[in-house]
Amino acid sequence: MKKNNASMQNKLYFQYLALVLPGFIIFTIGLIIPLILAFRYSLTSWNGMTAEKPFVGFQNYIDLFHDREFLDSWWFTLKFTIGNTIIQNAAALLFAVALDSGIKAQKIYRTAFFIPCLISAVIVGFVWLKMFSNVLPAVNDALGTNFDFLLFGNSKTVLGGLLIANNWQWIGYWMLIYLAGLQSVPAELYEAARVDGAGAVKRFFHVTIPMLAPAITICVVGITTGSLKVYDLLVSSTKGGPGRASTSVIYKTYTTAINGRQYGYGSAMTVTLIVALLLVALIQVKGLKSREVQA
């Protein structure tokens, strides 16, 4: 009997290993090894072309803190991330609550909100570039108004234009996550709150928000990390301009490593971004998970 149990456990172990191993190999080749190589190259002044990779130690990282263009790219990325995180979470939750209130044609609204996130960010950039440069100015002419819709052409308004494009694409995605969370909240909690005399606002803040804590964690972390990695939207819309007003960290890294042939320096930029992503994700998850426990 013991031999049969042991053989069964061994069989299950090898089946589990067979299922996990392919994913582990792909994960290692596609992520772990490139990360190790990136850190290795960040310690060199390699130009990406020659076989020699001169070792410079941590000089690239020291230079980064004196690189005004790199620091400006971080400033833009942080502003874009903060704006996205606040707007997308608030709007997605608002739309989810509205759709969960029993309004008519819910399925049509859900589909309409969700469709933009199925479109490539590169296409979204082209769409909004045409909207701001051709379509909306044509509406101006038709209505006889004088609104300035050339948001991508002004360093003061380019951030707002990119936030509009990005939020248009992704609000529907996060809305569905909040909607799923809302539909899992027991109706008994709302009934009990009504019996205790709680109004709609109190029910929202004392019942809905605490019960949505897991969904809030997913949305906040997902939006923040995604915004920190913004790149493809910029390629098709602003190309980092005007000037360097919309140059993100990844866009700066790409232009440095590929166009500037500074692979070692570009790798150092990549490593700093990865470290920042990990720290932000860990801090957010730890802080938001503690609220889930309290809820």
Image (spheres, rainbow, N blue to C red):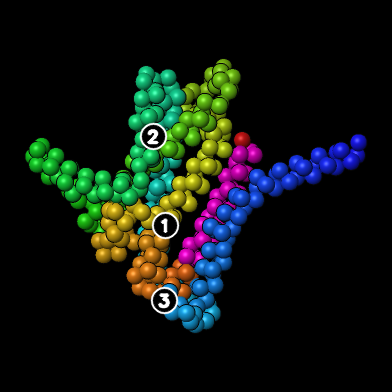
* Relative side of 282 to 227, left or right: right
- Say whether marks 2 and 1 touch (CB < 8 Å): no
- Say whether marks 3 and 1 touch (CB < 8 Å): no
At label 2, the amino acid type is Phe
- Quadrant where the N terminus lies? top right
Tell me if mark 1 has few (under 14), some (14-19) or many (20+) residues whose alpha carbon lies within 10 angstroms of its own. Answer: some
User: Residue drawn at (56%, 37%), measured in percent from left and top?
Assistant: 213
Q: From this view, report whether residue 232 is shown above or below residue 183.
A: below
Specify the quadrant of the image occupied by residue 155: bottom left
- Residue that extends furthest to the right in the rendered view of this protein: 1
Name the residue that disc number 2 marks.
Answer: 114
Name the residue that disc number 1 marks.
Answer: 78
Q: Is residue 7 magenta?
A: no
At label 3, the amino acid type is Met
Query: What is the number of the mark on residue 243?
Result: none
- Quadrant where the C terminus lies? top right
Q: Which comes sooner in the sequence, label 3 or label 1?
A: 3
User: Residue drawn at (16%, 46%), measured in percent from left and top?
Assistant: 134
Tell me if mark 3 has few (under 14), some (14-19) or many (20+) residues whose alpha carbon lies within 10 angstroms of its own. Answer: few
Mainly helix, strand or loop, the magenta region? helix
At label 1, the amino acid type is Leu
